[in-house]
């Protein structure tokens, strides 16, 4: 234990150490766009989530939600867990998470509306509640937001130091056209995240998943 922690413990008790430890932990929120659902693409989602379940430690948090409606709600959250500090219970939770992921893959359906901003706002709330310094939002989406007339989505979002990762998805058969359109949306979202005091990155190689936390 460092001299700093010893001094803090002497002054305020062991609760301070527990709070500092919690701040050092990671919380990850995975958003999956169901507007153009594809089994092959969901296999990528499964691969990433299995990596996260293997990587995240007891006391760290993971959530999975789908973007498949015009207005994101609690019903769109598939699973969310803070893994118990006891390894045996943590492992049981991870197995339960995998089961919920499997059920989701079988029941997932396409949707004509995508409230990406609503999903991001929910993710930020979850990450802030987790109380960790290391906060990550993984976006499996083409970033095309289908807005309803009664929804306003062009406003500044406070990302509060969250790390937002665009997981590459290029779903169109017309690769040249979608690549240009997707590139514009990437620039738009990068600007939005960075203006909101967040960090932005894009990952297109699922063999380099350790880049999520770098």
Image (cartoon, rainbow, N blue to C red):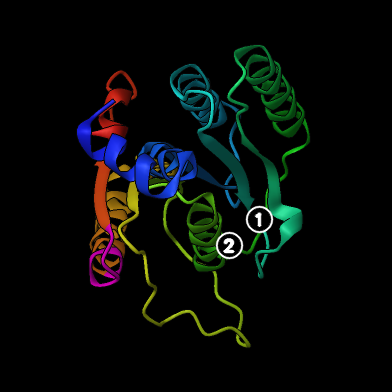
Report crowding for label 1: few under 14, some 14 to 19, many 20 or more residues within 10 A (C-alpha): many
Residue 92 higher or lower than 186, as above or below: above
Q: Which mark is drawn over residue 114? A: 2
Residue 203 seen anywhere in this rendered image of the structure: no
Q: Mark 1 vs mark 2: which is more N-terminal? A: 1
The structure residue drawn at horizontal position 31% and vertical position 18%, both measured from the top left corner, is 207
Is residue 132 or residue 98 the one in the foreground? Answer: 132
Q: Which residues are magenta?
A: 192-198
Q: Report the side of 167 relative to 125 (left or right).
A: left
Picture quarter containing residue 134?
top left
Identify the residue shown where x is 49% and y is 43%: 15
Q: Is residue 141 visible?
A: yes
- The residue lying at 36 percent from left, 48 percent from top is 11
**Residue at the image point whose x is 30% and y is 64% from the top:** 193
Question: Does the CB distance between marks 1 and 2 fall below 8 Å?
Answer: yes
- In the picture, the quarter occupied by the C terminus is top left
Q: CA distance from mark 1 to mark 2?
A: 5 Å
Q: Which residue is mark 1?
A: 68
């Amino acid at each position: 234990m460092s001299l700093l922690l010893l001094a803090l413990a002497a002054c305020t008790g062991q609760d301070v150490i527990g709070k500092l430890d919690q701040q050092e932990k990671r919380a990850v929120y995975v958003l999956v766009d169901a507007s153009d659902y594809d089994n092959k693409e969901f296999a990528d989602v499964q691969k990433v989530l299995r990596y996260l379940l293997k990587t995240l430690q007891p006391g760290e948090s993971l959530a999975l939600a789908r973007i498949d409606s015009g207005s994101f709600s609690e019903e769109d959250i598939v699973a969310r867990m803070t893994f118990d500090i006891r390894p045996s219970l943590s492992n049981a939770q991870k197995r339960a998470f995998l089961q919920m992921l499997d059920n989701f893959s079988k029941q997932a359906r396409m949707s004509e509306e995508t409230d990406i901003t609503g999903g991001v706002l929910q993710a930020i709330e979850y990450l802030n509640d987790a109380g960790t310094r290391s906060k990550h939002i993984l976006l499996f989406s083409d970033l095309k937001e289908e807005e309803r007339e009664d929804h306003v989505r062009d406003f500044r979002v406070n990302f509060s130091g969250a790390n937002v990762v665009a997981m590459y998805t290029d779903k169109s058969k017309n690769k040249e056209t979608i690549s240009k359109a997707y590139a514009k949306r990437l620039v738009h979202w990068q600007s939005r995240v960075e203006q909101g005091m967040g960090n932005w990155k894009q990952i297109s190689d699922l063999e380099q998943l350790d880049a999520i936390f770098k």
